[in-house]
Amino acid sequence: MKRIAPLALGMFAIGLDAFVLSGLLPGMADSFDVSLAAVAQVVTGFTFAFALSAPLLAVATAKIGRKKLALYSLGIFAVANAASALAPSLWVLVLVRVLAGAIGGVYSPAAVGTAVQLVPPAQTGRALGTIMSGLSVSTILGVPVGVLVGTQVGWRAALWVVVGVIVLAMVAIAALVPSVGAAPTPGLKERFAVLTDGRVLVRMFVIFLYGVAQMGLVYTFLPAILHDSAGVSTKSLPVYLLIAGVTSFIGNALAGARLDKGTSPKAMLGFALAAVTVVIAVFPYGAFNAVAAGVVILFYGFAVAHVQLPLQYQLMRIVPEHTSIVVSLLNSALYLGTAAGAALGGAVLAAASTTALTWTGAAVVALALVIAVAVRQSPAPQAAPGAVPAADAQQRGPAGAAVDTAS
């Protein structure tokens, strides 16, 4: 997995940039003399650009070698972040954040496509787990890093730190990751036909609901939830986020290894969603003091690490010829769900309490669980002339591994 670690660093850089902004918003508002609500458009622009552009750019860049595409996307991403740090006004900042979000959506499928080609079929799960661990760690560390650096040296300096991490990832990928070719390039019509496959769409809906609940309703408001339930202060918050980050990192590694050893991705997803539902529901009651909150957060980090990976694994087995497309669609659905969940969470919090927030989140994850468990394998689509027969494609997973897609 040494050749894949630099790709995980790139995922860390993408995620760090996305989540570090949450800790920088107050400083940005002061710098531009605008309200916090106005400067929040910086996050909204990034999120929606990431979600909406990823599938389209995945098609447009399909003929570029995966390593080259990873480096190109990170290079433009670094420029966009440098421009963000130099932005003279709020609206210039919003525009460059839209660019950053749009190009950020290109890197993830490129990294996954590279990783899959660099490992034997039996190690696909571990490769995906390694890649996703970078994103998991950035999700947890982004906010405290933003708060720490932003309050000490300012939000512009914090963005330069992100640029430094991106450049470090580029150097590591260029030096340590072997070059791999582009994926097979079917026509545009065939690519968008993926969206008509019910097996794909239902899994996109599951990750969308998960994004609404776990990322939007819970993680976005986690500081308020921990404060109300356990009295956790802003100064203590990084400790809890670190606990979640470590357990999430370990969970990703274990999930990938278990998938490679034959664990059913459907079963893993079902157990993970059930665990997330329970943990979110008991937040207001289980996290009744500082120690109990740490225990709940530990289980929280471990549970959430087992959700996205089996979904990716399932999609790569269902349509192995469209790996980059389905990975980008999965990311889009997650980010759209996160944006929708954050908006819903604000409304719930204004009308009720953080307890209502966690119960709403638990209900939405429970709905995702019911759908994930109830979904059945649909008939394989007919192969296009000259394409790999659908029946054969169904039996071959990433890098040609024999699989049973019904799991």
Image (spheres, helix red, strand yellow):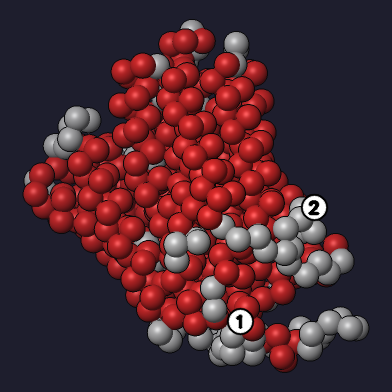
| CB contact under 8 Å: marks 1 and 2 | no
Visible residue check, residue 253: yes
Q: Residues within 10 Å of mark 2 (few under 14, many from 20)?
A: few
What's under tag 2, amino acid-wise? Ala
Instruction: Residue 199: tell me if it is visible.
Output: no
Residue 353 located left or right of residue 79: left
Q: Where is residue 341 in the image (x, y as percent from the top left)?
A: 47, 46
Residue labelled with disc 2: 60
Q: Residue at x 17, y 35 (%)?
A: 236
Which circle's residue, 1 or 2, is located before the other in the chain?
Answer: 2
Residue 292 left/right relative to 220: left
Image disc number at residue 397: 1
Instruction: Please say if 216 is above or below 100.
Output: below
* Closest to the observer, 286 or 190: 190
Question: Could you tell me which residue is drawn at 67 percent across and 63 percent down?
Answer: 180
Q: Which of 87 and 52 is in front in this view?
A: 87
| Image quadrant containing the N terminus | bottom left
Residue found farthest to the right: 385
Q: Which amino acid does label 1 sit on?
A: Gly
Q: Which residue lies furthest to the front in this view?
A: 175
Q: Whole-percent x and y of residue 375? A: 54, 80
Above or below residue 52? Residue 58 is below
- Label 1 and label 2: CA atoms lie apart by 24 Å
SS category of the residue bearing label 1: loop
Query: How many neighbours does mark 1 have within 10 angstroms: few (below 14), some (14-19), or many (20 or more)?
Result: many
